[in-house]
Image (cartoon, rainbow, N blue to C red):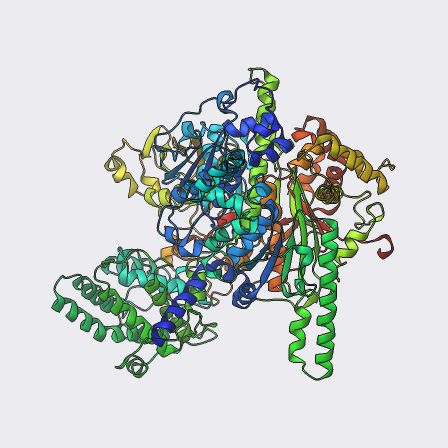
Amino acid sequence: MATMTAVGAPQPPPTSSCPPILRGIQAALGHDLLTEILSCRILLVGSGGIGCELLKNLALSGFRHVEVIDLDTIDVSNLNRQFLFRSQHVGMPKCVVASEAALKMVPPLNYLHNTLPQADTDASATQSENAGATYIPHHGNIFDNTKFNVPYIQKFALVLNALDNVAARRQVNRLCLAASIPLIEAGTAGYLGQVTVIDKSSNTECYECQTKPTQKVYPICTIRSTPSQPVHCIVWAKELYKLLFGPKVEESMLFEDEESLRAESESAAADEQEDGATTDNGNKTSTMNGEGGEKSTYMDLVLQVRTLLLQARSDQFETRLSSWSGLRLLGPKLLYALFGTEINKQIDMGRYKTADKVPSPITWEDMESATAEPFISPTQWGEYQPTDIWTKDDCSAEIIACLLDAVQTHDDPNFPLPEFDKDCDMAMRFVTAASNLRSYVFQIEPIQSVYSAKGIAGNIIPAIATTNAIVAGLQVLQCFHILKAQLAMQNASGGEEQQTRNLKEVCRYTYCLRDKTRKGYLLQPTTLPDPNPNCFVCRNATVSLALNTNLWTLEMLLSRIIKKELGFAAPTIMVGEDIVYEEGEDIDPAEYASNLVKTLVALPGGGMGHGSSLRIEDFTQDLEVEVIVTHKENFVVKEDEEGGGESKVDNREEIEKFEIGGKKHVVAAAAASASATIDDASKSGSNTDAATPANGTKSDDHSDDDDIEVIEEGGATKGDGYDSKEPAKPSNGGTNGSKSPMRKRSNEDRLENGVKKAKLDSTEVSEEVECVVLEE
Amino acid sequence: MTGQAAKAKAAKAHNHDDVYDRQIRLWGAEAQKRMSTARVLYVNLSGVSCEMLKNLILAGVAAVICDGRVYPEAVRELPSSFFGAEEMEKIMNEVHDVSNDDDDEGGLAAEAEGEEPTAKRAKVTKMTVADAVMPKIDELNPLLHGRNSIEERDLMSLPREYFGEFDAIVASRITVEEVKFISSCLTESGQNVAAAAAAAAATGEVEGKEDTVGRNTLFIVADTFGLEGCAHLDFGKNQTYRREIGKDKLSDVSKVDPYVSMHDMFDMPLCKVKTGRWDKVVPRGLLLQRLLMEYWGQQRTEVQKENGDHDQFVDFATNWFSSNNLSNNDESATNHVNLSQFASIAAHPEISPVSATLGGVLGNEVIKALTGRGEPANNVLLFDGMDGGCRSFVLCGEKEL
């Protein structure tokens, strides 16, 4: 099909003329498959931890035409496992360095020159004297549809995924389904990993058939007013970072201006009658049990700080100096407002009268002594270690130091600073200090070191070389099986492609486990699962969506649901016959701008009200889905259990609530910038209502907090095919015909035991995964 | 000056933490310290042991390489990122050219200042596999620079107490005789350590005790062949571990069942071995690894025929099966080995993804033992690339079950 093997390849040459490194391949897999390996084209998406291992395996197995897509550059913390990279490569594009290194490992090929079809060569190919082997890096984004589209995917025999995020995985999944090209998917998290094969024509489960747990999202009020865990404080501190240094101050959850206050005030009015714990701070509007309506005490100071930071961009030394001294004066005042006055105000408003612990705000005296001259921030001490735990005073001093650093880093980067980046030293020091200071105020333990805060703030999932090596090895073995099946089909059909390959017979879903199963398996193969009939991606199922159609605007629908939850890249939205929104290269964004701000019911074509249906098409993904809308006014919100016992959420969140698939309750994600450690995400399990099942999938799929879950034999029963279809299996070099006894046992193993299935929540989300920061 | 030195040291420590950041987050700073002070002896490099070497070097575990075989001849077929095919073939061609010119006295003199010193060195000084790999592993993890080394002595001439100095020994392409030698040396030094610990306990020096008890030398013998691989593991009598429970919590220390010594594993007649209740016959992977080890041992002693002589292998294997009482039983695994087909795999056993997978699994087992976290496999691991399964079972003699 998609491969380009010469049919009727010549007789095997004598072993001695095969490149020595490939003699093992020839002996184990046979000459025909080796020929296929030498000529086929492989696409690899991702050249990080798993990608490096894959490239090595591919090169040493003789694959000669590989293209690699990756948009990342090399970081120091990659060096412990992404073994094609050296310290001198830090900052360079991963795919370029990795392709070059891998190409050097491709065994030189002298003996097959004349028997191989010439693959088209690409001008940008990394060429070597190695007779036409091409490892082509594409330093770019898989979402770039001008390059990486369905026709592009169809150039390849198969696609290997080595990605670290759900969004890119979904995109590749959709491209491969549309192109009918097999995809070998893999991921790791720590010691755990898994490999699977997705192939439309073999009727396998696709990447989106099962819900991928999305990241933990915290209600805004938990973040803004009632934190109870370190992670709440860290999320808050990242918002504060955005507020002080970020490019778009108004995107911070802590931002307030006249308009936002008015909106808040209006919506809060609805709640006023409830329980009105009145306040006596003299403000006319703040009689409600909330925070709406009144400007927080720190907001003016924040704006002054930003003005000073902006001023510090000046070329004039004097101006910079004055902004520096301005910040030196203003800093303690800002901190006092954030961690003193504002907290006191909230206490006075009665916000914590039912809370277990009443916060202990810092005093102005605290602040003065912590930031008095000469002041040395903890990171300026000689013996500073990232694992140190700072005191309250240390935290104050460090925050001031960060503010002053922002002035001094005049050259690069200029204020406003880029978005929070866990690898930016100043950003991490600031977030650690600010979140700890908040933890001290709210008496939340444990206080985090810079090191541990980085793990939480950057959502770092530990990755190691060994597990990456395992899954990459398994992926390349799946590669062999798929190529063998494709080859067999070509030969059998004699040109007519009637026969369908069934990769379920030769490929496996394999788990890499931490602890052996009862039968001793550390790598546990299972049958490739069937598709979920409710999957809108591979089964064309209808999606049901419930939300408040009077409040949601098209823009919210587009960004929160169509792009984020459903994963569309360039959607066209239709209500009835009318296109209400469209995007793409040749489409003027202004054309639908007026629709974006409209509420759903007010859209053209009769609006999107209760019972209406809309169609979403994405040309770039070759995907189309029908969505049935249900209007729903009220969502009962269960607060995070640890969320301080509050039973309702402020109204700003209310308007973004929705349910997809009609089964699982979803607390929406106004706190979209919230992020969590994986541990938090998996611990909260069924509590993690933010997980959005794309389609009524079993919500109990991730309801326990163990890494391992026992599933019933389910898929394993279908494993019968393994035995009964034994003769149909490829005979890989003839060694496996003799293996049925073992295979049978391993099948019984599955039946008898049930399969211990790793519940790799984290893995499925973001394998290999360095950092998934939730923002955007 | 001293300030600067301290600064440089601090910079290096910082670097250390940055490089190992992800794994420290996985197994903790304490465990990383143990990893960073550990040393592993690699006896003969193969595809699978090179993968373990790569994984453990990256993780910060230093290596001592004992492989005096001639480079590149010995590793020409070995699929590893350490040995570039192009470079090896170039050297092979040059050596070939040089040997063609051997009669030419003048040629030799000319070569002294010749254009191809690499080829010359390869021929004259017989670069070993260990020599060839060392710069590559130093480059792979500069933080380990100075801690890796080459063991130039012949394996069988090493002092008996030598092996016990290592945290782990990883052997490939090794003969049964050599396995038994290393194992008995380890048993001796283990007894010495135990005796010393007992003496220390008697004299009241209790602090040292835990350290010495925990210091088992791990011994792994691993090979791959075609799509399959097999490894024997002997982690000593005193292996303990803790299990991870949720975030940042560890269970109490549990003891791993004492391992059957590697020597005893290899002493068991294959027709009598028991592997637990799941296997009715000797597992195929186990059988094949033993067969290959015996075959390689015999090849070393006999006049070397062309590597991969098909008939010679089939004859050898047939005799070996029958002399081990393995071929008479209808249920026997040997019925499922097509010797004629396996002969070409025996001659060219290694492929990259199988090495990578088994090397990764074994790397994790070593890490489990070094960090004391997670229960290590006991005592045989089989990998089957047809279905991607890897399982462990306890190999023991009949009477022990």
Q: Position of residue A675 (x, y in %)?
A: 43, 57
Residue B349 place in picture, x, y as percent? 65, 38
Name the image quarter holding residue A10.
top right
Going 77% across and 53% down the picture, which residue do you hit? Answer: B265
A275 horizontally vs A767: left or right:
left
Indicate left or right for B26 with B16 as reference: right
In this orientation, which residue lies closer to the viewer: A231 or A371?
A: A371
Position of residue B82 measured from the top left corner of the image (x, y, whole percent): 51, 46
* Relative vertical location of residue A577 with respect to residue B383 in this rendering, above or below: above
In this rendering, does residue B8 appear at all? yes
Between A135 and A353, the one lying in front of the other is A135
Q: Position of residue B171 (x, y in %)?
A: 65, 52
Quarter-of-image position of residue A484? top right
Q: Is residue A501 visible?
A: no
Answer above or below: position of B50 versus A350.
above
Q: Residue at x 30, y 79 (%)?
A: A367
